[in-house]
Image (spheres, rainbow, N blue to C red):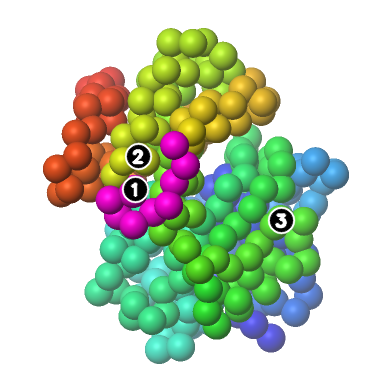
Amino acid sequence: MTTIALIGPGAIGGTLATWLGQRDDLDLTVCVRTPVERLVLETPDGEVIATPRFATSPEGLAPVDWVLVATKAYDDVAAAPWLKALVGPQTRVAVIRNGVEHREAFAGRVADENLVPVIVDFPAERPAPGVFRQRRYGWIRVEEGAAGEAFAALFAHTPIDVATTDDFVSVAWRKLALNAAGAVNAMTLKPSGVAHDEGAASVMKALVAECVAVGRAQGAILPDDLGDQVVDGYRQGPPDMVNSLLADRQSGRPMELDARNGVIARRGAAHGIPTPANSMIVALLNAAAG
């Protein structure tokens, strides 16, 4: 039986844990701060329930076959004790997060050959602890290779489009463009419907344009009209959708600004590419949070 531990059961992590909990051939442990009795996921096709094992401390835990890290970028330090207990020489660690720095986040703590970067693109929310909402099934992409194929197989039973890719860099930067535009929601304190405002949409496109320029310098293949695609996606989706950056600001939690917009400014500076829009929105949101 394959043993799995998931760290970070937020909106994305909790959704993935609930789907994994449907398999009888997996031994799943969900690492939590506050225990719950079960996981409940609202999907487009109805409710899905899972009752995995919950652990509130890494004490007594042993290495597993897979560790799925779905924490926010600012929670990496909190994940360290769990990794120490759960990761053995053969443990594969799937890093499921926003941004383009999956490997950098765990360099020195997990052997590079055991790291499996993962990009997820589906809207998910956590209305309450242990309760999740997946508005569409979306997709998951992972680097091609044996580890990537093994990860994809974990979710083969789900309606999510899970596959490996031979161009993870392009996939990651394309998803980053979507995340970068989402800073407008946090800035305005408004959900996805704000994209119907032409002024807000123009700012979104400016953020994406900088992401495209820097991403291309990093080797990503990105279309010229990606900004239009991102805004159209926001406009076609539910107008009340709340992304994680907005949810964090509304709740007074830290925001993943560096992983979503700051990285564009940092990598842009390294390439000599100006990124005034992303730099400005990071500065303003940090000032607002401070």
C-beta proximity under 8 Å, tags 2 and 1: yes
Helix, strand or loop under label 1: helix
Determine if residue 7 is in view: no
Q: State the residue at coordinates (64%, 53%).
A: 139
The residue pinned by badge 1 equals 215
**Residue 39 spot, x, y in % from top left:** 69, 52
**Residue 181 spot, x, y in % from top left:** 43, 30
Amino acid tagged 2: Cys
Task: Please tell me which residue lies in front, 274 or 55.
Answer: 274
Q: State the residue at coordinates (34%, 66%).
A: 103
Amino acid tagged 3: Ile
Q: Classify 10 Å Cα crowding around label 3: few (below 14), some (14-19), many (20 and above).
A: some
Q: In this view, does 20 lie to the left or right of 34?
A: right
Where is 130 relative to 89, above or below?
above
Where is 109 relative to 169, above or below?
below
Image-quadrant location for residue 214: top left
Q: State the residue at coordinates (31%, 61%).
A: 105
Helix, strand or loop under label 3: loop
Mark 3–mark 2 Cα distance, whole angstroms, equals 27 Å
**Magenta region, main secondary structure:** loop
Determine if residue 219 is in view: yes
Q: In this view, does 287 lie to the left or right of 144?
A: left
> Is tag 3's residue or tag 1's residue first in the polypeptide sequence?
3
Amino acid tagged 1: Gly
The residue pinned by badge 3 equals 160
Mark 3–mark 1 Cα distance, whole angstroms, equals 26 Å
The furthest residue to the bottom: 89
Instruction: State the quadrant of the N terminus.
Output: bottom right
Q: Give the range drawn in magenta.
A: 215-224
**Residue 151 spot, x, y in % from top left:** 59, 72
**Residue 96 spot, x, y in % from top left:** 48, 58
The residue pinned by badge 2 equals 211
